[in-house]
């Protein structure tokens, strides 16, 4: 593990390694807060960015993590169908409480609480994808198959058409 990573990025690196994977986290001087900024910084296409979007179930307020391509939006109705109840967008405070990370740097794993990840099936169509690594300046490269295995996420068609 690189000692020059921020504490948030180190937390993500540790979570990756605890699951038996090796992914190098890149902490950059440029922002990766938005999907387009992350694509520009990583030198990839927007569609190869994994957006980590946090929702809450409407009835039980449980956190749900939607992992979608940077080029797509999550369809709340399809997401609700995948989780079995309506969902609402989470507030920044809710996101930080359940993930331990700020919006713009939420990774697909390493959260404070167990989140139920729903991975959009469209992400499986790429050879390589890039995900946030705990800060608005950190990303890591992985394959879609590794994303599914390391998060234990459920794959479902949740992109907005």
Image (cartoon, grey):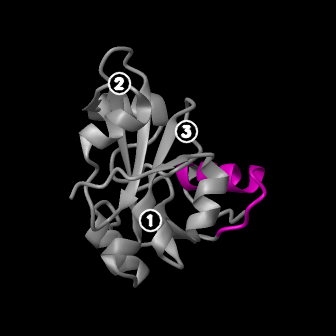
Tag 2 secondary structure: loop
Q: Is residue 30 visible?
A: no
Residue 94 visible in image: yes
Quarter of the figure that contains the N terminus: bottom right
Q: CA distance from mark 3 to mark 1?
A: 21 Å
Q: Earlier in the sequence, mark 3 or mark 1?
A: 3
Instruction: Out of 59 and 98, give the one closest to the viewer.
Output: 59
For image coordinates 43% across by 49% down, the residue present is: 106
Task: Determine crowd level at label 3: few under 14, some 14-19, many 20+ residues with C-alpha closer than 10 A.
Answer: many
Depth check, mark 3 against mark 1: the one in front is 1
Q: Percent position (x, y) of residue 157? A: 38, 53
| Mark toward the start of the polypeptide (2 vs 1) | 2
Disc 2/disc 1 C-alpha distance (Å): 23 Å
Residue tagged by mark 3?
A: 111
Residue found at the very far top of the displayed protein: 59
Instruction: Compare marks 3 and 2 and give the one earlier in the sequence.
Output: 2
> 106 or 54, which is in the foreground?
54
| Residues shaded magenta | 8-23
Location of residue 6 by image quarter? bottom right
Image quarter for residue 31? bottom left
Direction from residue 88 to residue 30 in the image, left or right = right
Residue drawn at (34%, 50%), measured in percent from left and top? 158
State the CA–CA distance, disc 3 to disc 2: 22 Å
Instruction: Tell me the crowding category of disc 2: few under 14, some 14 to 19, or many 20 or more residues within 10 angstroms, Cα based.
Output: some
- Which residue is tagged 2? 85
Residue that numbered label 1 is attached to: 123
């Amino acid at each position: 593990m690189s000692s020059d990573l921020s504490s948030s990025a180190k937390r993500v690196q540790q979570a990756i390694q605890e699951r038996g994977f090796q992914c190098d986290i890149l902490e950059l001087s440029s922002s990766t807060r938005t999907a387009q900024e992350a694509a520009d910084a990583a030198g990839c296409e927007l569609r190869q960015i994994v957006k980590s979007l946090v929702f809450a179930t409407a009835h039980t307020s449980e956190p749900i993590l939607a992992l979608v391509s940077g080029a797509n939006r999550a369809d709340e109705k399809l997401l609700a169908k995948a989780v079995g109840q309506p969902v609402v967008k989470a507030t920044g405070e809710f996101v930080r409480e359940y993930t331990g990370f700020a919006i713009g740097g939420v990774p697909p794993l390493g959260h404070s609480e167990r989140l139920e990840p729903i991975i959009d099936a469209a992400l499986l169509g790429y050879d390589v994808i890039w995900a946030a690594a705990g800060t608005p300046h950190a990303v890591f490269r992985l394959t879609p198959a590794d994303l599914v295995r390391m998060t234990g996420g459920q794959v479902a068609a949740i992109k907005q058409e």
